[in-house]
């Protein structure tokens, strides 16, 4: 009788250890490959593919709204990626020298006008943000007056913006904001 209890206890402990090892391996696997899947290098290029899987959600007017699923070719050298959920979905991608790419998705916006504006100076960019009512979302970001700015507005609800870009990186950031693709 005592022998059977010891065997059951050992079997239970062994099963717990197996499940713990399995859980730890799944966590490590998802950490290593999950992070790598969001920034896939394009062979022979100075760009990587940034992927937003659209898993973030929020409740608006008793309805659950999901973030937009998209892919974007971004320049190599991403330092930090931050995500915001408010009445909009925001993604801030930070690069060296305080250069940024920001993606806003406003699910409840009714505007349908699309446009592209690149190589804007500080004054024109500020006026355009006021006209589009997105200046408030950019208040926490330091904008350098001597830099270049650009906006790509897609389907009236998605803004892909680059900020504080210097002259030599202009072409890369222009390519990046124009490479936005929903999937």
Image (tube, rainbow, N blue to C red):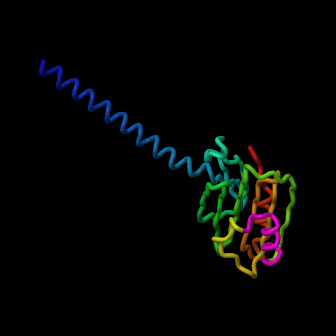
Q: Position of residue 5 (x, y in %)?
A: 17, 23
**Quadrant including the N terminus:** top left
Residue at (81% x, 58% y) in the render: 153
Q: Is residue 122 above or below residue 4?
A: below
**181 horizontally vs 31: left or right:** right
51 lies left or right of 112: left
Residue 182 vertical placement versus 152 (above, below): above
| Camera-nearest residue between 182 and 141 | 141
Q: Residue at x 60, y 60 (%)?
A: 81
- Magenta span dominant secondary structure: helix
Quarter placement of the C terminus: top right
Residue at the limit of the structure toward the top, as seen here: 1
Left or right for 6, reference 40: left
* Whole-percent x, y for residue 118 in the image: 83, 68
Q: Hey, which residue is sitting farthest bottom in the picture?
A: 146
Q: Residue at x 73, y 53 (%)?
A: 106
| Residue 43 place in picture, x, y as percent | 70, 54
**48 or 154: nearer the eye?**
154
User: Does 134 lie within the magenta span?
Assistant: yes
Q: Which residues are magenta?
A: 122-135
């Amino acid at each position: 009788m005592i022998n059977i209890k010891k065997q059951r206890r050992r079997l239970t402990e062994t099963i717990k250890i197996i499940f713990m090892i399995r859980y730890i391996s799944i966590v490590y696997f998802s950490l290593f490959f999950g992070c790598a899947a969001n920034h896939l290098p394009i062979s022979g290029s100075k760009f990587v593919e940034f992927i937003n899987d659209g898993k973030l959600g929020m409740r608006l007017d008793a309805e659950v709204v999901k973030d937009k699923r998209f892919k974007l070719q971004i320049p190599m050298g991403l330092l930090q990626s931050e995500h915001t959920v408010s009445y909009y979905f925001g993604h801030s991608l930070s690069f060296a020298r305080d250069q940024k790419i920001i993606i806003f998705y406003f699910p409840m916006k009714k505007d349908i006008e699309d446009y592209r504006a690149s190589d804007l100076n500080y004054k024109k960019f500020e006026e355009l943000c006021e006209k589009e009512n997105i200046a408030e979302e950019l208040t926490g970001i330091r904008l350098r007056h001597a830099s270049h700015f650009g906006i790509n507005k897609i389907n009236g609800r998605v803004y892909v913006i680059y900020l504080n870009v210097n002259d030599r990186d202009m072409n890369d950031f222009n390519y990046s904001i124009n490479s936005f693709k929903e999937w």
